Image (cartoon, coloured by chain):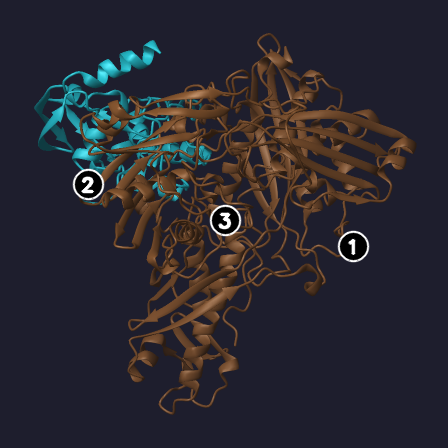
Amino acid sequence: MTDVASRRDVGERPAAPERIMTLTVNGRPYALRMDTRVTLLDALRDRLGLVGTKKGCDQGACGACTVHLDGRRVLACLTLAAQAEGRAITTIEGIADADGPHPVQQAFMEHDAFQCGFCTPGQIMSAVALMAEGRAGSDEEIREFMSGNLCRCGAYPNIVAAIRDAASRGGHDARL
Amino acid sequence: MSTVESRPRVGAGVNRVDGPRKVTGTAPYPMDFSVPGQAYGALVQSTVAAGRIVRMHTDAAEGAPGVITVLTHENAPKVGKGPTTVLGASPLPPLRNDRIVHHGQHIAFVVAETPEQATAAARLVRADYETAEPLLDLHDPRAEQVIDPWGMDTSRGDPAAALESAEVTVRATYTTADNTNNPLGLFATLAAWEGDTLTVHDTSQWPSMVRTTLATVFGIPESSVRVLVPYVGGGFGAGLRAWPHVVLTAMAARMIKRPVKLVLTRPQMFTSIGHRPSGVQWLSVGATRDGELVALDHRSLTSLSMEEADYEPFASGTAFAYRCPNVITQDRQARLNIAVPTSMRAPAEAQGNFALESALDELACKLRMDPVELRLRNHTDVDPRNGLPWSGKALLECYEIGARRFGWSDRNPEPRSMRDGNWLVGYGMASAWFPYFAQPCAAQATVNRDGSALVRSAATDIGTGTYTVMAQLAAEEMGLPLDRVRFDLGDSDMPNSMMAGGSGLTGALGNAVHDACRRLVRTFAELACGDTDSPLFGFSPDDVECTDGRVHPAGRPDLGEAYADILARHGLSELTSNGNSTPPVDTELGMSLAGAYGAKFVEVRVDTDLGLIRVARVVSVIDGGRILNEKTARSQIIGGTVGGIGMALFEDTVTDPRTGRIANGTFADYLIAVNADVPELDVVFVGEPDHGTATGTKGVGEVGLVGIAPAIANAVHHATGKRIRELPITLDAVL
């Protein structure tokens, strides 16, 4: 029963300090008063209403919450919101531009690279970063470096096809 | 009246109509909804597998910051039991009494102002148990066995005598592991009451059933319950029940008079929403020396929870898969202290087909006969159970085309004979089937004043493409371009629909949509043909077609007029028709409804030193009847194939044999196929529209998975000479 006792101690501790954090998401700054333990994922979803970033495990194992921090992909469930202060946070809501969808989004639609669609925002955020990382050179490379993003519907071959297509058209600069 | 002269066998692979929402993150899943004033729930689950709760300690949780209430069996209102459905008895309501029947059973529900407060307080709830020794072993003689739970045991001829006298026999035992559905979307419920009216956002594959269940449980009219699920987030069978956590969330919301939202955690997804049950299968096959089957004896024992039902007749497929005069199939379920099992993609067939198709490969080896040839020799064009011809079965074409595309003739039949450097190469194949299934469905079609159409039904799109293919079907029936038709679903206020399950929805709902659209076109035709101002005046409504949004005499588009013009002239803002479908009956049709068939060809590579098993190629040739959308149907087959690779090589929900706790209940520990595990997959559709139904579809959600595990196991045998009869096949088994 010692673990229960220690858990009770945790519960009876005073509330964790809150403070105001400024998060810059998709180019827009937001000031939020939050518990310092809030993850970036919960801050995006619950505080900012940006629910395109998905929670599939909350344990860093599925990739559904992939976002970009300064252009690099990170798992928002394993990142504290406080760690993202002062950095550029990009989510699925922020990658299209005024002209239309991002080439990777377009390629995902053309190649039917999703089914239920739940993992799709994370897949697309990983795919965009993958191309920027120069990791989309071959199908084998795409498969390997997309393996942190689980898709239970099993759309993997179409995800590979979509990324191959988008990469061959010049990545971000291409308009399909 | 005719709407379409000739239907394409394979419909255009148009992009999903919901694609733009899914790629931009704007498709709302149940966990994405919020309403003002909502509180948050967190589950407390049993840490023992059997016994009773002596005392609940909730004081600490009740005093924790933000906590509104803590529900346990001591204070929860007793609610009614949900209805029995085609899938059997409803899961039992939560917090009924002090009895514990499995590890991870919900024993308390904490409601607080924030999700963090609810989660933190849930950790403070403690239970004192009087524990009992849990029954966890399928073979435990103390476990109650349910005999022939679905009335599907079969027997024909004299299998015992035929086995006794057979020239060649194979007798083998196969086991399959517990697998967990694990859709990526965490199951979520958001329940809000307004007086006695309940609105629920819920992760479900069957909103009509959830509505009925909640109405029954809370004793309110069905018209007072609305269940919404525009996007599901995957289900694979897990969304076919109204689970206890759904009832709990609605119960708590009613008690505190505020909306309550619950999102399951990933570990809770292993114990709260079903799983594919483990089982052992005993198979005896008798054949002549030239490969003609003379006897099949297929028996299964599978795991079941203590109090619920689960449709899982593993052996039943063997009764119709091949021509064989002497067959017995028997299914038994053992009641254990495990969480409720439920359908997981291709229930029963995934497991039963693994055993039968493995045993046939063993027979082919014994006969020194090609495995494809063995299947050709035992093919049947009639249903052996009733002697009726199948409503459509292009399985012979599946074998032929599959073997050719795969290059099956390059296979050296000798095990361990093919190598590529350090890799042993193996070719394996299997047949696949998934039986026809349908339930009643309704749909409603409306043409608006501008000539655009809205078609609706309380169905779900779990990723199969329902939004898209139903819009395509309606557009075709009404002669409208696709962008003038919207299909809406995911709302129990819409016409009743069957579940997205059993590969049945596309056919059953398609027939209802077909019916609604045809009735609607007929209404327009009757209006126009009886109207002196219409160019259709005087024509018979029986002889009217519609194309390009215009109703016209058959073959005379020049004499037509637009839907919008007909509405305007009659002062109507819209016209609506309802349509229905009921499952056809074999004996009335004079045909046996076939379901989907397929042939699977797999190449595996096994590292000689490390035992590493890689799937290098898969060819799936599928008879899915009429295919409404080549692109989404292909996705169903590749998705099923990926699920089959997982079942064959990775997936194994491990229960601790002493405590009944699931030991690998996370995505880090429970392995599913990832991108790098899946090669390029070749998919071909063959056959013709099914003759048993109006739309001619068969449903392709499950047949993609069936047959993959045995084809892999057979390929592993071909590569290594080792016959693995236990799934998943891990590298230690081949070393």
In front of the other: label 1 or label 2? 1
Residue B387 numbered tag: 1
Q: Residue at x 44, y 46 (%)?
A: B205
Q: Residue furthest bottom?
A: B532
Element assignment for label 2: loop
Rendering colour (chain B): brown
Judge whether A63 appears above or below A108 on screen.
above
Rendering colour (chain A): cyan
Q: Are marks 3 and 2 on the same chain?
A: no
Task: For residue B617, say whether it is visible.
Answer: yes
Residue B630 numbered tag: 3
Instruction: Say what amino acid the circle numbered 2 marks.
Output: Asp
In-image side of B188 versus B237 (left or right): left
Residue A97 numbered tag: 2
In-image side of B400 versus B636 (left or right): right
Q: Residues within 10 Å of mark 1 (few under 14, many from 20)?
A: few
Q: Nearer the viewer, residue B637 or B128?
A: B128
- Location of the C terminus of chain B by quadrant is top right
Instruction: Say what amino acid the circle numbered 1 marks.
Output: Gly
Q: Tell which subunit mark 2 falls on.
A: A
